[in-house]
Image (spheres, rainbow, N blue to C red):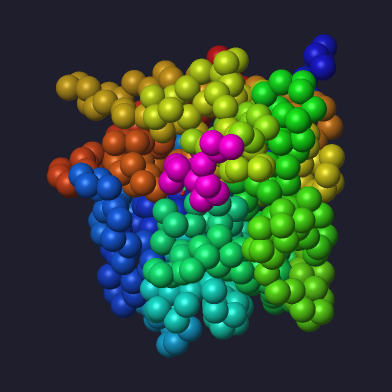
Amino acid sequence: MDHSQTRPFPASFLWGASTSAYQVEGGWNADGKGPSVIDTRTQLPAGTADVTVASDHYHRFAQDVALFAELGLRAYRFSIAWTRLIPDGDGAVNPDGVAFYHRLIDALLRAGIEPVVTMYHFDLPAGLQDKGGWSNRGTVDAFERYVRLLVSEYGAKVCHWLTINEQNTMILFGSALGLVPPGSADPQRELYRQNHHMLLAQARAMAVVHQLAPQAKVGPAPNIACVYPASCDPLDVLAADDFSAIRNWLYLDVAVHGRYNPTAWSYLVERGWAPEVSADDLATLRAGRPDFIAFNYYTSHTVAAARDDSPAAGGSGDQHLLIGEPGVYRGVDNPHLQRTGFGWEMDPIGLRNTFRQLYDRYRLPLLVTENGLGADDVLEPDGAVHDPYRIDYLHQHITQMQAALTDGVEIMGYCPWSAIDLVSTHQGMRKRYGFVYVDRGEDDLRTLDRIRKDSFHWYRRVITANGPVA
Ligand code: BG6
């Protein structure tokens, strides 16, 4: 629907930007930090930057926070590395790691930037993975203990907590992120068992925040994308609905209502992948209540009815290159959408659709915690980085976000990916997302200097205007 007038963004709107610990910090073993599954993974594509130094934010956070303040950020969404605080995941606490995040949070608060903290962003402690990782129910207890530490240390300073980043990506592409223990007889069954344990961990984390920091708010942070049918063939529509249940609602129905989505559950039962769910588990799930929903959005998906040649579940290893699953759906190209240089379809209107679907289903305030364009940005000889493609992508998404706001959706804030260049999950440094360029290559660390891109100056104007600017 068209609106003759758009609704303005509220004065309290959280214009922000995002990062995650392992992708930006470096200092992978500094000051007592333990290894995570990211540090110990072995299948990194050849020639791709590792995360030992990343963007060296661990040593340069003060300079980075000053840049974020100059950018005008009202919020900075980052994650805490579990292994900095508890190096093996469930043993002794590392005071130096605890102190680092106090320094970071204090610097943000001094700069007038609200910290939005993700408790866990893909980097499970390797010490816990060695004991079975999320397949082991003991990891749920270890996570609750870690969350109690987080909230008792930082609860007086942090008003917005995110539990688990993109749990659905971890499950849908678990092999790529090193979650499946080697030799698993049925990796999908294992992943959905892990998923259930993560849902329990998340519910307990939300209860802990409400108990220890009643003034704070907490929510899940999955990757949510609207799913279009390839045509009006009822079989394509059914496939889109099935995939949306498996990809989106499975995760949020449990987080919000404490119960599994029926379509997703019957999919799990049909395949023999349904986890064991006890009466105690159900009580735990029901006791965890989010105050808002955070979500990451990069693109929509388009699917058709499955054919016999649909590939097996488990994904391509790239979270947005959809392939399909026999008997369920088949991913197809959307002829109405253009693609980024890395092959991801761009769909700003899909963001509006996704907002509306989320708000219709759950009636909770919504916070965008990732949205952005990965590109091979070029540092020009005169020291400039021109990224008009990123400005265009973000401008279109912000415009559609305002349309969703005008539709009546309650939107708390927008934190695009990423505040500063960082290491992509599987495409290294050449796939950059930041407003700030970091001078390093895949293997060559160069100066690690920070350089403001054109998008930096543009986003500052957006924040000042409290809405889209051309
Ligand atoms: C999200 C993750 O899935 O997408 C981020 O939460 C990730 O960690 C981002 O970096 C972009 O994906 P990629 O593969 O381009 O780095």
- The residue segment tinted magenta is 308-320
Residue 468 lies, in percent from the top left, at 61, 22
> Which image quarter holds the C terminus?
top right
Q: Nearer the viewer, residue 155 or 89?
A: 89
* Magenta span main SS: loop
Which residue occupies 39% across, 29% down? 342
Name the image quarter holding residue 116: bottom right
Which residue, as the protein is rendered here, is positioned at the far front? 308
Which residue, as the protein is rendered here, is positioned at the far bottom? 92
Q: Is residue 37 above or below residue 380?
A: below
Which residue occupies 55% across, 49% down? 313
Residue 158 is left or right of residue 68, and the answer is right
> Which image quarter holds the N terminus?
top right
Residue 246 lies, in percent from the top left, at 68, 49
**Disc count in the image?**
0
Q: Is residue 38 above or below residue 378?
A: below
Name the image quarter holding residue 89: bottom left
Note whether residue 48 is visible: yes
Task: Indicate yes or no whether the magenta region holds residue 156.
Answer: no
Residue 182 lies, in percent from the top left, at 39, 69
Note whether residue 461 is visible: no
Q: Nearer the viewer, residue 34 or 303?
A: 303
Which residue occupies 41% across, 61% down? 178
Residue 436 lies, in percent from the top left, at 36, 36
Task: Indicate yes or no whether the magenta region holds residue 311.
Answer: yes
